[in-house]
Image (cartoon, grey):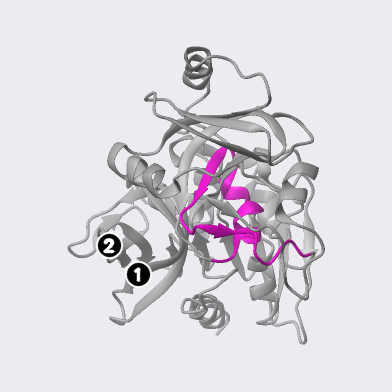
Amino acid sequence: MTTSTRGSVKVPAVLVLEDGRVFRGRAYGAVGATFGEAVFSTGMTGYQETLTDPSYHRQVVVMTAPHVGNTGVNDEDPESQRIWVAGYVVRDPARVPSNWRSRRSLDDELRAQGVVGISGIDTRALTRHLRERGAMRVGIFSGQALPDEGTMLAEVRQAPEMKGADLAAEVATKEAYVVPALGEKKFTVAAVDLGIKGMTPHRMAERGIEVHVLPATASVEEVFAVQPDGVFFSNGPGDPATAEHPVSVMRAVLERGTPLFGICFGNQILGRALGFGTYKLKYGHRGINQPVQDRTTGKVEVTAHNHGFAVDAPLDGPADTPYGRAEVSHVCLNDNVVEGLQLLDRPAFSVQYHPEAAAGPHDAAYLFDRFVSLMEGQRA
């Protein structure tokens, strides 16, 4: 829902929230109009990974860090082939990027990919507003001749909501591909792409896993045609309540007892497959500084998040499911939101955050080792 032409920092821009709050600033990136769900990310670095994370499809991302774009844009850090955010909101964009890997400015990259943004607004006030009122629809409008506020607000309120949105197939690969193991091949994993980040199969490849990345629409037969030692369900955008096909595929995997690992959207899919509900968080968790406790070890990790929905599972002990007992393995220490699930009677677990650590932190890398251990145990 984006229209654009080449932009200029001198072009006026307006951000309009669906509750009528208005912020005025300057165009950043492309000039035009865009719509999405307004969310905020608390990371102070890693903006390239944020922009190219498919989980941000149809979301307008507000950066809470005041300075953005300082290290420019390089060709090594993107998590996918394009920018997925619907719009971008920053306070003080870098005037001159500086980094030995930088190839172009962030402003130029946003323009080249047609991403409409806004700069020069009070992002602290906007973030506080979203924390108090919750994530909501938003529009960014830029250009020399803008509509009146009433017209812009009406357009924002006509945009689709995130609740009920079925988006995984829109961002997933259309054709299967293989990421080969680095070094000796030890295992084969079928990875169902619901919006996978490029670093995720790389982290598995580092552990001797040959990863077959499959479309979100892959059938059970296609998943097992690669003769996997384990099955992985990735992160992705949208409302997990709409994800009927991935849930049915995951249930088939659970029936067979094949080792299973899910992250982010994959965690919500496991929750649904086990019979738990999901719900929309007020403003979600996004950023690379979220504290999570692994309840199986007591260890506290600093983790990378990008989710607006969560699993409604009991925190007070194992629950019976059609596939045996399941328990909450991880919780967010900020608000007790479920951040991980594990089955006690079958080799399956998931986490709600991003252990591939792009752009950091690295506290959760052990989860890939845990997946390897499951596959080793099954083979033994």
> Within 10 angstroms of label 2, few (less than 14), some, or many (20 or more) residues?
few
Residue 237: x %, y % from top left: 55, 44
Place residue 341 in its image quadrant. Answer: bottom left
Camera sees residue 218: no
The residue under the point 32% across, 81% down is: 299
Residue 35 image point, x, y percent: 57, 29
Residue drawn at 77 percent across, 65 percent down = 74
- SS at badge 1: strand
Asked whether the beta carbons under mark 1 and mark 2 sit within 8 Å of each other, the answer is yes
Indicate the quadrant containing the C terminus: top left, top right, bottom left or bottom right.
Answer: bottom right
Residue segment shown in magenta: 45-74
Q: Which of marks 1 and 2 is nearer the N terminus?
A: 1
Residue depicted at 77% across the width and 49% down the height: 108
Task: Say what amino acid the circle numbered 2 marks.
Answer: Asn
Judge whether residue 57 can be spotted in this image. Answer: yes
Residue with the mark numbered 2: 334
Q: Position of residue 206 (x, y in %)?
A: 68, 81
Figure quadrant of residue 270 = bottom left
Give above or below for 37 relative to 289: above
Please state the horizontal and vertical placement of residue 301, each as a whole percent of the image. 38, 76
Q: In which quarter of the image is residue 278?
A: top left
Residue 245 in the figure: left or right of residue 207: left
Q: Mark 1 points at which residue?
A: 291
* Residue 15 drawn in magenta: no
